[in-house]
Image: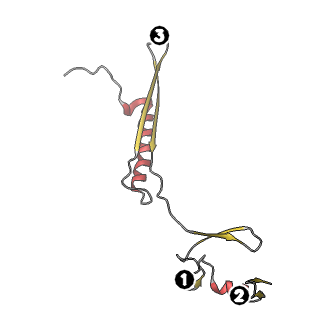
Amino acid sequence: MTKSLINIDLSKISNGALQEKFEREMQKVVANLMDPNTDATKKRKLTMTLTLQTDDSRSVVFMDTEVKSSLVPDKSVNSKLLIGLDDHKQPVANELKSGTPGQTFIGDDGKLHTDTGEDVDQVEAKQKNKVIDLQHGKEA
């Protein structure tokens, strides 16, 4: 068996600091692989970079080590928004909660809600004291 000409143990570089960096990044990769909010089939990457530079005498080499991971981001989530203008022509937006514009639904609390998730009883209570101009379809 021939003797190795390069006697560098990666786990012992910088008193084990490179090994610690590797383990820390590997832990991030494993956590990302196990995260149900990420795409299971996408590839993750762990990169170890050793940058070497010598001085003018070429007898001493300065080595910088870096370990980094490329993770998969969380899956996106979709939603629908209802947009329009209020009575003062100001833009408004609300998340569509019912699935269909104008459709009410029964919420987790067992109460009836508007398509944007407002409690119907509260909306009706607000409307009770308002006078409506029926010819123009808005408040008088």
Question: Residue under circle 3?
Answer: 57
Q: Quadrant of residue 23?
A: top left
Mark positioned earlier in the residue sequence (1 or 3):
3
- Give the Cα distance between marks 1 and 2: 18 Å
Mark positioned earlier in the residue sequence (2 or 3):
3
Circles 1 and 2: CB distance less than 8 Å?
no
Question: Residue under circle 1?
Answer: 105
Q: Is residue 38 left or right of residue 5?
A: right
The dot on residue 125 is 2
> Which element type, helix, strand or loop, lies under badge 2?
helix
Farthest residue, direction right: 140
Q: Quadrant of residue 4?
A: top left
The dot on residue 87 is none
The residue positioned 74% from the left and 89% from the top of the image is: 128
**Residue type, numbered disc 1:** Phe
**Residue type, numbered disc 2:** Ala
Q: Residues within 10 Å of mark 3 (few under 14, many from 20)?
A: few
Mark positioned earlier in the residue sequence (1 or 2):
1
- Give the Cα distance between marks 1 and 3: 79 Å
**Residue type, numbered disc 3:** Ser
- Give the Cα distance between marks 2 and 3: 86 Å
